Image (tube, rainbow, N blue to C red):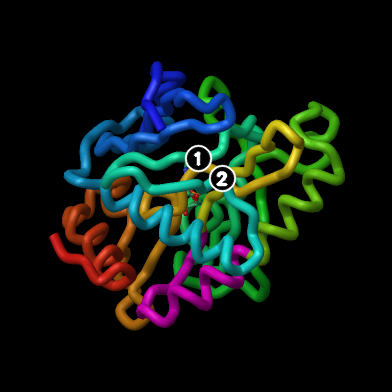
Amino acid sequence: MKKGAQLYEGKAKKVFLTDDPEVLMVDYKDDATAFNGEKKGTIAEKGIINNRLTNHFMKMLEENGIPTHYIEEISDRETLVKKVSIIPLEVIVRNIAAGSFSKRYGVEEGKSLLSPTLEFSYKNDDLGDPLINEYHIIALGLATREELDIVSEYTFKINDILKNYLIKFGIELVDFKIEFGKTSDGTIVLADEISPDTCRFWDSKTHEKLDKDRFRRDMGGVEDAYWEIMKRILGESK
Ligand code: TMP
């Protein structure tokens, strides 16, 4: 499959056309941003780690009945995916209080939640990705009731599958953000990435942070944390 013109450049990935109109190529960058692009930096080899881990998770989820956009890994940083129109929602699940949830509700980071929570943010950089509820989503035409039901069902299943998978590697899935897209025939599939950029991963014994919070919060040891996840899950070291 030939890499064609660049279609789009996001904060962490570039997307290219291919010679198949139904297929795109994603190219993962080392660029890191936080707080809606206010904080900028790079995390060495993040693009490789996020590409490889995302594909690993997507394959595992497919095997467990979740449709995804994944087609084929082409190189360390490049992957073929189905062309989808992204539903402009950040779909966030939380198992343990952290981040904006802890801040908003005055809950200590690390407190286990009685049940997993689901929330949506409206993907809109100009507005800073505001929290949005299901009535707002439907009223604005961002997704239909039926689409939201499918997204919610897949999302809780993904949480169960990922949480149980990661705990075997001593990793606690604190929370994560996923995105969904629609293929040309209207099928809803998991899209975007699942990586230390988009999940909170804590060591299940020490609760050490092994994710992008180390970058967001200037904690140091960012690359080592990403490599630790890579080593535990894919058995690969720097
Ligand atoms: P939050 O606690 O800051 O709302 O983040 C919840 C989860 O979503 C966390 O795992 C990090 C992830 N996330 C993204 O992937 N992209 C974002 O822009 C933000 C704010 C969070």
| Residue 7, image quadrant | top left
Q: Which residues are magenta?
A: 158-175
Up the image or down, 2 lies above or below 163; here it is above
Q: What is the x, y in percent for residue 21?
A: 56, 25
Q: What is the x, y in percent for residue 151?
A: 72, 50
Q: 200 or 105: nearer the eye?
A: 200
Q: Residue at x 56, y 63 (%)?
A: 61
Which residue is label 2 attached to?
A: 69
Within-10-Å neighbours for mark 2: few <14, some 14–19, many 20+: many
Looking at the image, how many numbered discs can be counted on the residues? Answer: 2
| Residue 132, image quadrant | top right
Looking at the image, residue 98 sits to the left or right of residue 46; the answer is right
Q: Secondary structure at mark 1?
A: strand
Within-10-Å neighbours for mark 1: few <14, some 14–19, many 20+: many
Which residue is label 1 attached to?
A: 81
- Going by the numbered disc 1, the residue's amino acid type is Val
Label 1 or label 2, whichever comes before in sequence order: 2
Q: What is the x, y in percent for residue 119?
A: 66, 51
Up the image or down, 100 lies above or below 227; here it is above
Q: 200 or 178: nearer the eye?
A: 178
Up the image or down, 225 lies above or below 23; here it is below
- Going by the numbered disc 2, the residue's amino acid type is His
Q: 126 or 1: nearer the eye?
A: 1
169 part of magenta stretch: yes
